[in-house]
Image (tube, helix red, strand yellow):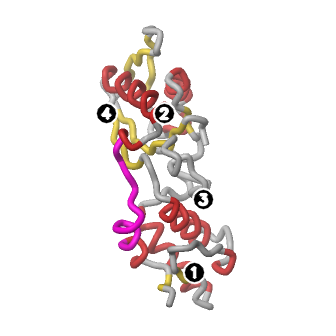
Amino acid sequence: MPNNSGKYWVTWANTHAKNSNKIDDLDPVFKASIKAFIKALNDAGATVDVSTTKRSDKRAYLFHWSWKISQSKCNPSDANKMVGVDIKWDYGDLAKSKAGALEMVIGFGLAVPPRSINPPSLSSNHIAGKAIDMTIRWAGVIKIKKKDGSEIPVAYTQNVNANSALHSIGKYYGVKKLKTDAPHWSYNGR
């Protein structure tokens, strides 16, 4: 018998569909790129906190539908089923279904508008180990080295999605920013 959406599924996912926050779990090519980028950031004085690298497809499924339902981007009855995840999204009461989905969004710590305007993807680069969620911080202006050794001054901004100087340095390392999702970087910017 399916379990209703809600906190139960956060606990379930933390046991049966864990995220990794280990860089070593990434695809080997992307891992080399991200290690070089993070080293350049650290060498310049930035701190980098990695929250997610590789993601289970079941966790991505729970992220996707809980976000869409809680943010009124679809009806609970629109959610597809997934083998191995016996969840009930539609309680027959829209407000209760949305509340259960929102419990999951909060429990998973998902970025919602304005931090992210996109639902978590069902086919995320995280599943293939080609994406990373990380928070990058520093004070003032730092000089970050590109792969060729030249340095670029980069001012800190609260909105990482708007920091085009940081994005351009990431590209030099093969790490591209998804500009609609604050922590998300990947091999292709999606």
Residue 30, numbered label: 2
Q: Nearer the viewer, mark 3 or mark 4?
A: 3
Judge whether residue 16 is colored magenta: yes
138 left or right, relative to 185: left
Mark-to-mark CA distance, 3 and 1: 16 Å
**Tag 2 or tag 1, which sits nearer the N-term?**
2
Q: Are marks 3 and 1 in contact (CB under 8 Å)?
A: no
- The kind of residue on which mark 3 rests is Leu
Q: Nearer the viewer, residue 73 or 55?
A: 55
Q: Which residue is mark 4?
A: 47
- Marks 2 and 4, the one that precedes in the sequence: 2
Which amino acid does the dot numbered 2 rest on? Answer: Phe
Mark 2: few/some/many CA within 10 Å (<14, 14-19, 20+) = many
Q: CA distance from mark 4 to mark 1?
A: 39 Å
Q: Residues within 10 Å of mark 1 (few under 14, many from 20)?
A: many
Residue 106 picture location, percent across and down? 43, 67
Q: Earlier in the sequence, mark 4 or mark 1?
A: 4
Q: Earlier in the sequence, mark 2 or mark 3?
A: 2
Q: Of the residues tagged 4 and 1, which is closer to the observer?
A: 1
Q: Earlier in the sequence, mark 3 or mark 1?
A: 1
Q: Which mark is residue 122?
A: 3
Magenta residues, start to end: 11-22
Can you identify the residue that label 1 sits on? 89
Query: The residue tagged with tag 1: helix, strand or loop?
Result: loop
- Residue at 49 percent of width and 84 percent of height: 4
Q: Earlier in the sequence, mark 3 or mark 4?
A: 4
- Front residue of 115/92: it is 92
The amino acid on which the numbered mark 1 sits, given as a three-letter code, is Trp
Residue type at mark 4 is Thr
Residue shown at 37% from the left, 20% from the top = 142
Q: CA distance from mark 2 to mark 4?
A: 20 Å
